[in-house]
Amino acid sequence: METPASIYNEALNRYNQKIADAATEDMVLNMGPQHPSTHGVLRLELITDGEIVKEVIPHIGYLHRCFEKHAESLTYQQTIPFTDRMDYLASMNNSHAWVMGVERMLGIDQDIPKRVEYIRVLVCELNRIASHLIAIGTYGIDIGAFTPFLWCFRDREHIMGMLEWASGSRMLYNYIWVGGLFYDLPVGFEERCREFVDYFKPKMVELNGLLTDNQVFINRTANVGVLPLDVAINYGCSGPMLRGSGLKWDLRRIDGYSVYPELDFDIPVGKGLVGKVGDCWDRYKVRVDEIEQSVKIIEQCLDRLQKELKRTADFDPRAKLPKKITPKAQDYYVRAESAKGELGFYFIADGRTEIPFRVKSRGPSFSNLSVLPAMAKNVMIADLIAIVGSIDFVLGEVDR
Amino acid sequence: MSIEEIKLLLTNKFGEQVVAGQETTGLQPALLIDPDHIAQVCLELRDNPGTYFDFMSNLSGVDYGVDAGRFGVVYHLASIPYQTQLTLKISREHDRNGDSLPHFPSVTSVYATADWHEREAYDMLGIYFEGHPDMRRLLMPDDWEGYPLRKDYKNAEYYKGIKID
């Protein structure tokens, strides 16, 4: 076998040489890690020729907090707050996926009371709307539209307030537990949620008039950053990225987990209404349409929660909490549709302890971001901003 | 296609030795593949009209512990046309003393998403993927020493002379 040091450093030396060569011929430009339009601490190294980006080299890891190492030293229940900190804009969805995986390994996923499941879906969908509102608002600001940002944050604030009321925390909830919930919904939550839905529906119409159909916005995003479907699949893109390229692929329908099979909703896909299928505008539009579908799901959940699954005095959301969470020795990969796409956890349980032997998390943003160098070849720097914004990643999840 | 049929398909195509075993106890059955054939197996599973596993959900590097002395890689594939899932596993015994790392073939040529996943496995567990186009560390700095997710990893006390608390 070759001498280790040389082959393990080979790629690094090649990369250093490439940057050194580019520095004399073209220009190497650092975008980030503290650049506002990189949505967190992402560093993009651009090799540019004038205004044209010849190559993008993403550097990630600035927000790495060893989630997987934490998970291997804490019990399944103790890790839930750490999952919240992965995609911190959609924490409910993260803990839902984690909890589902553990429940299936324990074999108690069929025993969860219906009311608990509906509350989980309700808060997940609320959180999905909040996440998409941030995606839309910050995307507007990337392109140069300031007002939608303020409008989206104003509406998101109502959701944050409601989830804080339910869980005690604004963003990092630790609300969904293995076998149940932290608490039942507070009295009056359903009514307040319905008020929010009535308030929110006209706001989306306003937002569409302000941003979606805005000609300046369309000129900046249509036909920009087209992601062909085969490339999207090959790079493991999921969520609005994949649906924006025209594929009807939503794990809420495909896997039909939790109570999603009982709910009626559509899966929006990119149709290339103003440009080509899979451009930045399509991905944006998929998120706008998904908000409407989430509102539809929330209304159905509220119907059920206020009629046949009403709260009762003796209802205890912690009744099914297992005393000891020790799954049998096995490994299991759970996947769920988070706000950004397919969120997966791969568990290896050793069957003896309450601590997983190995956990690997597959963040949707991680795979969605990895397609960037393929998408952003030979584009203008200004278009690169539009492309990066349209991916809608959260660095907390990319770096974990 | 059931896991038995997939197994048959692979052994017919590549010979008996390609499937080293099968795990059927857990919720998700898995095929244990001969490490040297993993790239061909993935290509076949992706392009065969009967399977079409065109989507790689996840790739995890695994350190099976100091006692076991094994390193492995687990592939979670999904088929979009058939809406099925498949787990493939490869593993190899490797001595963790010394500088050499366990080597496995890269599947980047089949699934482009494996690029970053394999870099992460290299970074975290010190698994080297042969044929990977850019085998650099991904999350940790380029000059980091050691592989943090290995079971025998000792927390670094200093990084470039700076004390880590």
Image (cartoon, grey):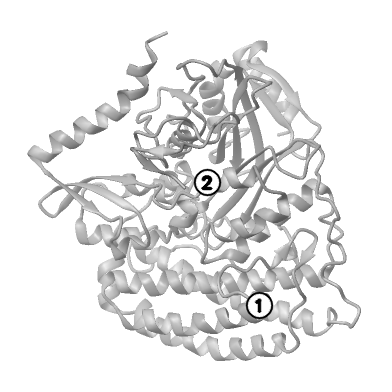
Q: In this rendering, is residue A187 above or below A81?
A: below
Rendering quarter of residue A84: bottom right
Query: Could you tell me which secondary element the residue under label 1 belongs to?
Result: helix
Residue at left 62%, top 66%?
A: A92
**Amino acid type assigned to the residue bearing label 1 in the image:** Ile
Q: Is residue A384 above or below residue A36?
A: above
Badge 1: residue crowd in 10 Å (few <14, some 14–19, many ≥20): many
Residue that numbered label 1 is attached to: A298
Report x, y in % for residue A26.
10, 42
Disc 2 element? loop
Q: Chain of mark 1?
A: A
Q: Residue at x 82, y 39 (%)?
A: A328
Instruction: Respond whether the residues carrying marks 1 and 2 are from the same subunit.
Output: yes
Q: Amino acid at mark 2?
A: Cys
- Within 10 angstroms of label 2, few (less than 14), some, or many (20 or more) residues? some
Q: Position of residue B25 (x, y in %)?
A: 81, 32
Badge number at residue A66: 2
Give the mark count: 2
Q: Farthest right residue? A: A314
Q: Nearer the viewer, residue A126 or A160?
A: A160
Quarter of the view holding residue B60: top right
The disc label shown at residue A154, or none: none
- Considering every residue shown, the one lying at the far top of the view is A1
Residue at the image position 20 percent from the left and 57 percent from the top: A381
Picture quadrant where residue A250 is located: bottom right
Marks 1 and 2, how far apart at CA:
34 Å
Mark 1 or 2: in front is 2
Where, quadrant-wise, is the N terminus of chain A in this rendering? top left
Residue B127: percent from left, percent from top: 50, 26
Q: From the viewer's perspective, tell me whether residue B39 is left or right of residue A60.
A: right
